[in-house]
Image: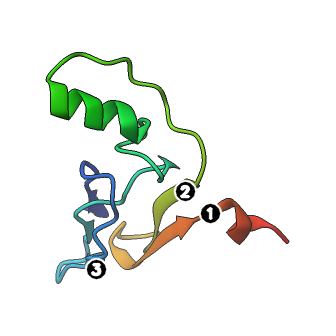
Amino acid sequence: MTAVLGTHTHVPTGDERVLSKGTAYCTDVGMTGPYDSVIGVEKEAIVERFLTGMPTRFETAKGDPRFAAVVIDADDKTGLARGIERLLLRPEDLAS
């Protein structure tokens, strides 16, 4: 198996590694979207809902976008991973 990758907490875990039998592993690759948010939603709506218990309209947060990913180097013949690298990019990281 080349890789086992998870994503749920929306924050990269930083535990990427290649396991002893050649499977790349990362508990949480992370979220792609607005990082100044609660799982991509405006923070104020989440806090209001938590404090009051009342339903609130969730709006997608704007600003501070991030791209979370991993890059896996795999052997063409066996499909086993040789390496894994975590990426967390901001727009300014891509500007040339």
Q: Is residue 88 left or right of residue 48?
A: right
- Picture layout, residue 91 above or below residue 54: below
* Mark 2 or mark 3, earlier in chain: 3
Query: Which residue is disc 1 drawn over?
Result: 90
- Residue at the image point whose x is 47% and y is 60% from the top: 69
Q: Earlier in the sequence, mark 2 or mark 1?
A: 2
The kind of secondary structure element at disc 3 is: strand
Residue at image coords 47%, 53% = 35
Are the residues tagged 2 and 1 within 8 Å (C-beta)? yes
Q: Which residue is mark 2?
A: 66
Q: CA distance from mark 1 to mark 3?
A: 23 Å
Residue 22, how many percent across, how many down? 25, 76
Q: How is the image coloured?
A: rainbow
Q: Quadrant of residue 16?
A: bottom left
In this orientation, which residue lies closer to the viewer: 90 or 75?
A: 90
Verify CB contact (< 8 Å) between mark 2 and mark 3.
Answer: no
Q: Measured along the vertical axis of the image, is residue 64 above or below residue 33?
A: below
The kind of residue on which mark 1 rests is Arg
- How packed mark 3 is, by other alpha carbons closer than 10 Å (few <14, some 14-19, many 20 or more), is many
Which residue matches tag 3?
A: 17
In front here: 14 or 55? 55
Closer mark to the observer between disc 1 and disc 3: 1
- Among the 4 quarters of the image, the one containing residue 12: bottom left
Q: Position of residue 17 (x, y in %)?
A: 28, 79
Horizontally, is 84 left or right of 27 in the view?
Answer: right
